Image (spheres, helix red, strand yellow):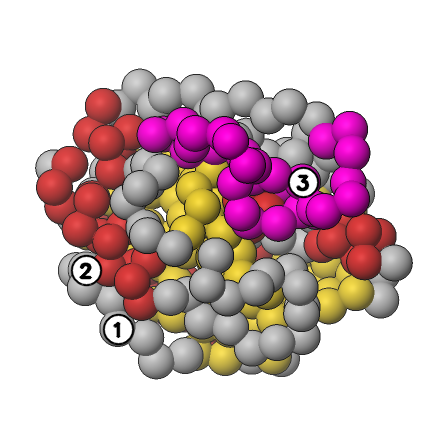
Amino acid sequence: MRMKARATMVALVPCLLFAAVGCSGSPAPAAGRSPDPKGSAAAPAPGASGAPAVSAAPKAKDATLEASAFRQGDLPGYQISAQGKNPNAPDGQPQADKKACQPLADVMGDKPDPAAHETVNRGIGSQKEAGLAVSASVSSYDESDAKRVLSRLREAVAACGAGFTATVQKQTGSYRDVKATPYKADGDESVSWTTTAAAAGVSAQVHLVVVREGDRVVRLMALNVASADKKVLVPQEVSDKQLEKVRKAG
């Protein structure tokens, strides 16, 4: 039942959220395995077998964008994964049933907005809080487009409190109780909200933070894969470190 629930959630949020836990396993690295400095897949859950090998994500063409992505060791107490998303996860940008909510559907897709030039993604699994999984992405934009992403998201959060549905490759999920959430993010501007994602009788609390730093857009999403109905927030240390890396990369 738990495996089925997690598989269903792939249709609701990017599998990047589960990258550090292998979409079904534990965030702890395998015994005797030295983590890839760029990021590595986590060990499968105890008792699991035949977990597929996972390759590292391809490097970004933009060297500064690649430098801004998390590497293993950047966050003590967290396992970083650079693996690509689950091959069973749908590709592309979800389509919302309400035009006003499309920016919120977009941010659940492969990139936070169609105007992004390039996006690098990492999965982060907490070794301090059981089940906490975070996805972190950094995207390059023209600065005017980056500003537009944040503006559209703020408008969508205000307009879509009652929720919406989104479909990608014939898979549909609903997002209800969209609520702006206070969150300190040290960037040029930011927007933070929580929502309950649901499909096929499975639901999960999700927290999203999107931050603009110049012409870069950082997208952070968190949920608890061990207790999907548990309220979560993106750990402050994760957002602080991600923005620090973006600024240092230039």
Q: CA distance from mark 3 to mark 1?
A: 34 Å
Between 90 and 41, the one lying in front of the other is 41
Q: Is residue 134 above or below residue 223?
A: above
**Is residue 139 inside the magenta stretch?**
no
Left or right: residue 37 compared with residue 54: left
Q: Earlier in the sequence, mark 3 or mark 1?
A: 3
Residue found 25% across the figure and 38% down from its top = 68
Q: What's under tag 2, amino acid-wise?
A: Gly
Residue occupied by mark 3: 44
The reply to whether dot 1 and dot 2 touch (C-beta < 8 Å) is: no
Q: Quadrant of the N terminus?
A: bottom right
Q: Is residue 155 above or below residue 22?
A: below
Picture coordinates of residue 63, whole percent (x, y): 23, 23
Instruction: Determine if residue 106 is in view.
Output: no
Instruction: Determine if residue 201 is in view.
Output: yes
Residue found 50% across the figure and 79% down from its top = 179
Magenta segment's dominant SS is loop
Between 223 and 35, the one lying in front of the other is 35
For numbered disc 3, what is the local secondary structure? loop
Q: What's under tag 3, amino acid-wise?
A: Pro
Q: Is residue 64 above or below residue 236?
A: above
User: How crowded is the residue under tag 3: few (<14 C-alpha within 10 Å), some, or many (20+)?
Assistant: many
Instruction: Determine the image quadrant of residue 64.
Output: top left
Residue occupied by mark 2: 187
The reply to whether dot 3 and dot 1 touch (C-beta < 8 Å) is: no
Which stretch appears magenta?
Answer: 22-51
Residue occupied by mark 1: 184
Instruction: Determine the image quadrant of residue 36.
Output: top left
Q: What's under tag 1, amino acid-wise?
A: Lys
Q: Which mark is residue 43?
A: none
